[in-house]
Image (cartoon, helix red, strand yellow):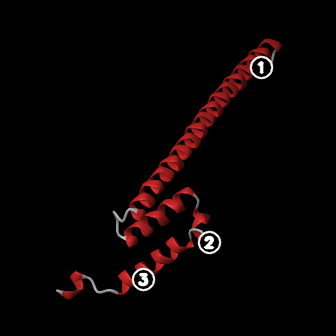
Amino acid sequence: MNSIGALVLLAVAITVIIGLCLYAWSLRKEVSRREAFRRDEDARAQQNSLENLDYVAGALVQEQVDITEGAWRCKVLLEIIDPSLTERSEFKAFAEHYSRTQRENALRPSAIDRS
């Protein structure tokens, strides 16, 4: 192979490598953008869950909702915020009430079974 052919192949190889580097860089920027969007969405979901938890707790205090419904909603919202929260002593009552009423509902014959 002559030197001109080798230089042409070298130029093509360098061009391809530069193109691949630019493509990899653009993909990395896209990943960073998506990660930032996901973090923002997670923060927004946390904030919404906290607000909803406040509403449910207020409704429980004012007896606007049944204790079982309120406990179930609080348990689910606590798990969305942080799954380990339902294991803390301050919030364990919600998880216990949830599991007890869930078992009772599972044991109770449904209207479909009676027909």
Measured in 3D between alpha carbons, the distance from the residue under mark 3 to the one under mark 2, in whole angstroms, is 21 Å
Q: Secondary structure at mark 1?
A: helix
Mark 3 or mark 1, earlier in chain: 1
Q: Residue at x 44, y 53 (%)?
A: 52
- Give the residue at mark 2: 89
Q: Nearer the viewer, residue 107 or 56?
A: 56
Is 94 situated left or right of 1 in this image? left
Q: Residues within 10 Å of mark 3 (few under 14, many from 20)?
A: few
Q: Amino acid at mark 1?
A: Leu
Q: Nearer the viewer, residue 87 or 115?
A: 87
Q: Which mark is residue 86?
A: none
Q: Residue lying furthest right in this view?
A: 3
Q: Residue at x 38, y 68 (%)?
A: 69
Q: Quadrant of residue 83?
A: bottom right
**Residue 67 sits above or below residue 108 on the image:** above
Measured in 3D between alpha carbons, the distance from the residue under mark 1 to the one under mark 2, in whole angstroms, is 68 Å
Q: Position of residue 65 (x, y in %)?
A: 34, 65
Q: Secondary structure at mark 3?
A: helix
Q: Residue at x 33, y 63 (%)?
A: 64
Q: Which mark is residue 10?
A: 1
Q: Nearer the viewer, residue 1 or 20?
A: 20
Q: Residues within 10 Å of mark 2 (few under 14, many from 20)?
A: few
Is 78 situated left or right of 6 in this image? left
- Give the residue at mark 3: 103
Q: Quadrant of residue 62?
A: bottom left
**Residue 115 sits above or below residue 28 on the image:** below
Q: Residue lying furthest front in this view?
A: 62
Q: Amino acid at mark 3?
A: Arg
